[in-house]
Structure formats: C-alpha cells, structure tokens
Image (cartoon, helix red, strand yellow):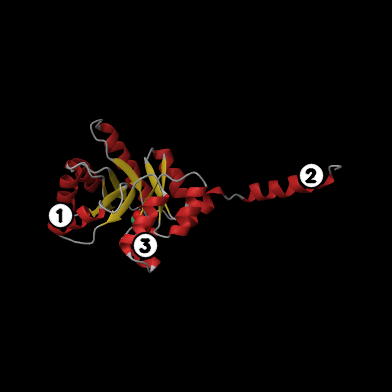
Amino acid sequence: MKFFIDTADVDEIKEAASLGILDGVTTNPSLIAKTGRKHKETIQEICALVDGPVSVEVTSEDFEGMMKEAREFVTWADNVIIKVPLTADGLKACKALSTDGIGVNVTLCFSANQALLAAKAGATYISPFVGRLDDIGRDGMDLIADIVQMYSNYPDIDTQVLVASVRSPDHVHKSALLGAHVATIPFGIINKMFKHPLTDIGIEKFLADWAKVPK
Ligand code: G3P
C-alpha cells in the first residue's frame, strides 16, 4: 500500500519524507491557500522533495480551462499529476490528459458509480472522500469496499483507489484491510499512526531497568 501525504506544507512533507514512508503528495486549493504562499513555487518545492506523484488540482470548471491549467502545471515538474473534479468536464479532461500520458487523480468522489466513470475515463487514481461521507452520517469505508470490489471484478481497470479525506488512523488501517492502493494522510494522522501508549510505557520501563545495569 502506498502512503501519500495530504498537505501543501513543505515542513510537514520534509518531516514525513524523513520517516522513509512517503510515496507521494496530494494538494488541493484549500491546502495551498492554507500555506499563504504562491502556488507554482510551493508545488515546485514539494516536487523536489519527493520522488512520487504530486497531485495539483485545477480550479477551472470547464474542459478548456482545465486543460489549459493542466498543460501549465505539468511544465512545473516531472512528477506533477493533475487533479480534476468528478464532473462531466472533469471526466472529459481526465480522458484527454490520460490519453496524452499525463497522470490524473479524479477527486471529490462520493459514489461507486462516480468511481466507475473515472476508471472508464482513464484515471490513474480515484479519490473517494471518506471523512466527508462520515460527516453526513454515512460510512465512508463502505464506499472504499465497494470501489475496491468493483475494480477487482474487471482486471482491465488499472485505476488505483486513493483514499482521501482521511481523518483517523482507523481510516488508514481499514483502507489497507480492504485493499485500497493508496491513502493520502494528513501529517497529524501520520504522527498518530506510530504512537501507542504501550510503546511509550515500554520504553520508559526498559530505560528504568537499563539504569540499574552496572556500567
Ligand atoms: O485529499 C482531499 C482531502 O484533503 C479532503 O480532506 O479533511 O478536507 O475532507 P478533508
């Protein structure tokens, strides 16, 4: 399973990369806005920090506008891939970009049928938003289970399931149990993943015992 980090904060990306567990980065307009920095310089700095794909999202709502933005973004770095929303124009852009060999992450997916359409349009990744489904009283992980099952029914589908809107370590381990290909994880959740109170207690006990060893 691949781990991407869901942030545009370069310090968080550097820290996650130093753990040796990072396979890529996802950004979105909200995450870019949160940095207070310019889009292009931020993306270029991120792309230099990681070997894997860095998703850069278009903000145009029409096909031509999306294509214009995408063509610009892919000149910024070799590992830029394009994030398009799951709309009719987004799917058209997905088809056109993937046909040209450009990686596409189709985002804002909230249903199994949307995921099927993205796969048909040649998406490299489909991003179902589990946390936002949980927010409205649905179980986001049910959608992951459906998409993984549907895609596995058709060996010709090579779209990867990229679990997004991850809000807890539980979302990550359930994604792995279901066979999702990727989870894009906020920095705070990555930190929670390696923490366990029994690990801390264990270290404390080992150190206390070690202090009793004659030196
Ligand atoms: O990758 C999409 C993700 O950033 C959305 O997360 O927490 O805003 O629902 P959230």
For marks 1 and 3 on the same chain, the one whose residue lies earlier in the sequence: 3
Disc 3 C-beta below 8 A from ligand 1: yes
Residue 89, which numbered label? Answer: 1
Label 3 is placed on what type of residue?
Leu
Residue 111, which numbered label? Answer: none
Residue 69 vs residue 132, the one in the foreground? 69
**Where residue 65 sits: x, y (%)?**
15, 59
**Where residue 214 sits: x, y (%)?**
86, 42
Task: Tell whether 10 sits left or right of 72.
Answer: right
Badge 1 vs badge 3, beta-carbon distance below 8 Å: no
- Circle 3 packing at 10 Å, graded few (<14), some (14-19), many (20+), is some
> Looking at the image, in which quadrant does ligand 1 appear?
bottom left
Q: CA distance from mark 2 to mark 1?
A: 63 Å
Circle 2 is placed at which residue position?
Answer: 210
Residue 139 vs residue 186, the one in the foreground? 186
**Residue 16 visible, this orientation:** yes
Residue at the left extreme?
64
Q: CA distance from mark 2 to mark 3?
A: 45 Å
Label 2 is placed on what type of residue?
Trp
Circle 3 is placed at which residue position?
Answer: 31
For marks 2 and 1 on the same chain, the one whose residue lies earlier in the sequence: 1
Badge 2 vs badge 1, beta-carbon distance below 8 Å: no
Q: For the N terminus, which image quadrant?
A: top left
Badge 2 vs badge 3, beta-carbon distance below 8 Å: no
**Where residue 135 sits: x, y (%)?**
37, 60
**Residue 134 visible, this orientation:** no
The tally of labels here is 3
